[in-house]
Amino acid sequence: LQNPFLGSNFNNNEIEKSFKKLNLKIPPYFETDILIDKSTDILKEEKIIAWFQGRSEFGPRALGNRSFLADPRKEKIKDILNSSIKHRESFRPFAPSILEDYIKEYFHLNQKSPYMNIVADVKNEKIKDIQAVVHIDKTSRVHSVAKKENEIYYKLIESFYKKTSIPLLLNTSFNIQEPIVYSPIDAIKTFMKSDVDLLV
């Protein structure tokens, strides 16, 4: 298994049809590099993005193709996500999606974790820098991101790193008390009933 992105992909025409079906204005189109740059600027402002791209993940985790994303640096983001968006208990943790080359710098972990299925201790000196993705027991459920497996998501995190010196993002599943979104229609409907700032 090379990667978990085994679900359907949706082209621009299918996405446009989804907006038309819901009687919504078609949003502007941006080339990938411009979109990534704009998205990281918005994340830096402590806003939350609903991120929908490429093939959907197969499995129990959102791994960067159907995700809510946020700046991991401040603990208050975790509270906003739990109470206002995910509508779940305040103790529930969020995962860090980290560029794979920086795993050992932030976590006591000597391997990759591309499926977000390994919990690791956060290094003490890094806890203050990524408060929103550290659980009460000072652990995180790590998601390592490789360029060859998910290039666009990798570039998004890389762009955030260049602007903040933090090589990771808070990542949680793109859903609200429902299965993870699958299609453009799912993404638009879930976004519209959320308090998320932007749908990309």
Image: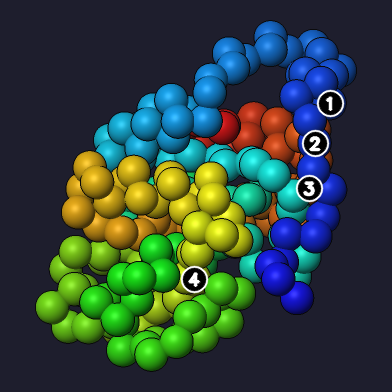
**Horizontal relation, residue 121 to residue 90: left or right:** left
Across and down, in percent, residue 22 comes to 81, 18
Query: If you read the primary sequence from the N terminus, does the residue marked by circle 3 or circle 2 appear first?
Result: 2
Cα–Cα span, label 1 and label 2:
6 Å
Quadrant assignment, res 99: bottom left
Q: Label 1's element?
A: helix
- Any mark on residue 14, and which? 1
Kind of residue sitting beneath label 3: Tyr
Question: Would you name the residue on which mark 4 appears?
Answer: 143
Cα–Cα span, label 3 and label 1:
13 Å
**Horizontal relation, residue 72 to residue 174: left or right:** left
Label 3 neighbourhood size at 10 Å, few (<14), some (14-19), many (20+)? many
Q: Does residue 61 lie above or below 196 as drawn?
A: below
Q: Does residue 46 lie above or below 62 as drawn?
A: above
Query: If you read the primary sequence from the N terminus, does the residue marked by circle 2 or circle 4 appear first?
Result: 2
Across and down, in percent, residue 195 comes to 51, 36
The quarter of the picture where the C terminus appears is top right
Question: Would you name the residue on which mark 3 appears?
Answer: 182
Residue at screen point 45% across, 87% down: 111
Query: If you read the primary sequence from the N terminus, does the residue marked by circle 3 or circle 4 appear first?
Result: 4
Kind of residue sitting beneath label 1: Glu
Question: Looking at this view, is 128 or 86 the one in front?
Answer: 128
Q: Label 3's element?
A: loop
Q: Are marks 4 and 1 in contact (CB under 8 Å)?
A: no
Question: Would you name the residue on which mark 2 appears?
Answer: 10
